[in-house]
Amino acid sequence: MKILITGASGFLGGYLVQAAQGRGELIGTFWEHPMPMPGVELHRMDLTDLVALAQFVRKVQPQIIIHTAALANLDACEAQKDLAWRSNVDATRMMAAVAHQLGCRLVHISTDMVFDGKRGNYSEDDTPEPISYYGYSKRMAEEDVLHAYPDALVVRVALLYGFPVSGGNSFSTELFKQLRAGNRIKVFVDQFRCPIWAGNAAAAVVELATKSIRGVLHLAGSERLSRAEFARELARQMDADSQLLEEVSMQAVEWLVPRPKDVSLNITRVRQVLQTPLLDCRNGIKQMLAMAPQNRTSN
Ligand SMILES: NC(=O)c1ccc[n+]([C@@H]2O[C@H](COP(=O)([O-])OP(=O)(O)OC[C@H]3O[C@@H](n4cnc5c(N)ncnc54)[C@H](OP(=O)(O)O)[C@@H]3O)[C@@H](O)[C@H]2O)c1
């Protein structure tokens, strides 16, 4: 079985490659960051070249596509709306059309940022109302995928944490570095998510790719936490000084792009179909720290 993972050089993509090892022949794509990974045939692919993208996928003839490549940076999407649209919407629509033609399984990765964050605990039946261009482009891509290929699965993933295994980055790496260096760092008390360890998310996505579920599913860690609560648990498990965490309101920061207050996801539905357990923050951070550079952790 051939499994195509787009964006294998990215943060989630690296974990997806690890999670899919042994499940079949792995083909991964990168754009600007070639990241050699054992057991993966890597190809350069440009999301914005739709003709080449379609040709590439037809040539690979995968049985499963996990489409994670995207312009995934909030500020970059706002600053380069045209690029965001072409990378996140046009390319995804093309990917869905080709997957449909080939009759292969398509799992498209979306985000909790499709919601406005006014309420939290969003289920799959809630109406997305994104407040950023990134969220808007990802929402439009969701609609286009399911329109072009109703059997596809859209997985809305919550905020990811962990150390990068190939490329990309996460807020948690910076938090870890600052705590380990003994530097003060601001953390928000009023921004809520259900963060999920990237290794856990990848295992769940790979499991979902082998099932025939269609439509939209939410995938998140099992707890709703503020950024400050997450940071406190990380500091605790690192034996770092929690006094380094300066707890502030989101309103203390002037954002280029507004951040939603509470995009926590309800995971009742995905739990009914998954065997992979969705970890709480304590256990997710434990897994994360087991992969820390020069591991100096305690539980
Ligand atoms: N990180 C999170 O917390 C989070 C949460 C929810 C959902 N998601 C979703 O998860 C997916 C992956 O996010 P991530 O955090 O792993 O992002 P990332 O680290 O920035 O990785 C993005 C990937 O997309 C590729 N890419 C970007 N522009 C491209 C282009 N023009 N042509 C071809 N490939 C291109 C990158 O390739 P190069 O690096 O080689 O250029 C990289 O492999 C995205 O769909 C995102 O919306 C992420």
Image (cartoon, rainbow, N blue to C red):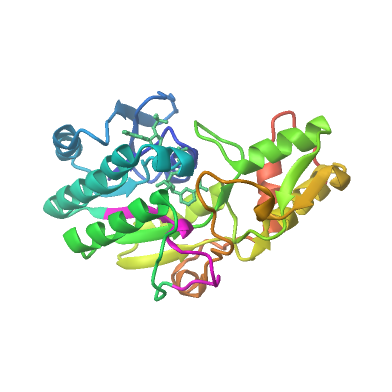
Q: Toward which corner of the image does residue 221 lie, by quadrant? A: bottom right
Relative placement, left or right, of 141 versus 97 is right
Q: Is residue 164 left or right of residue 77?
A: right
Residue closest to the eye, 11 or 288: 11
Instruction: Give x and y (percent) for residue 259.
Output: 54, 54
Residue 150 location in percent, x, y?
A: 21, 65
Residue 5 horizontal/vertical position (percent) = 34, 41
In this view, 4 is above or below 228: above
Picture quadrant where residue 1 is located: top left
Please name whichever residue, 264 or 3, is drawn nearer the observer in this view of the structure: 264
Instruction: Classify 99 as above or below 59.
Output: below
Pick the residue in front: 190 or 149: 190
Give the image location of residue 59, x and y in percent: 15, 35
For the point 34% across and 51% down, the residue is 137
Of the pair 20 and 46, the residue shown nearer to us: 46
Which residue is located at x 71 percent, y 42 percent?
289
Q: Is residue 182 magenta?
A: no
* Identity of the residue drawn at 51% across and 75% down: 268
Q: Would residue 119 be counted in the magenta stretch? A: yes
Residue 299 appears in the rendering: no
23, above or below 8, in the image: below
Residue 102 visible in image: yes
* Left or right of residue 268, residue 55 in this image: left
Q: Give the magenta range.
A: 106-123
- Ligand 1 shows up in the quarter that is top left
Q: Give the vertical position of 71 relative to 124 (above or below).
A: above
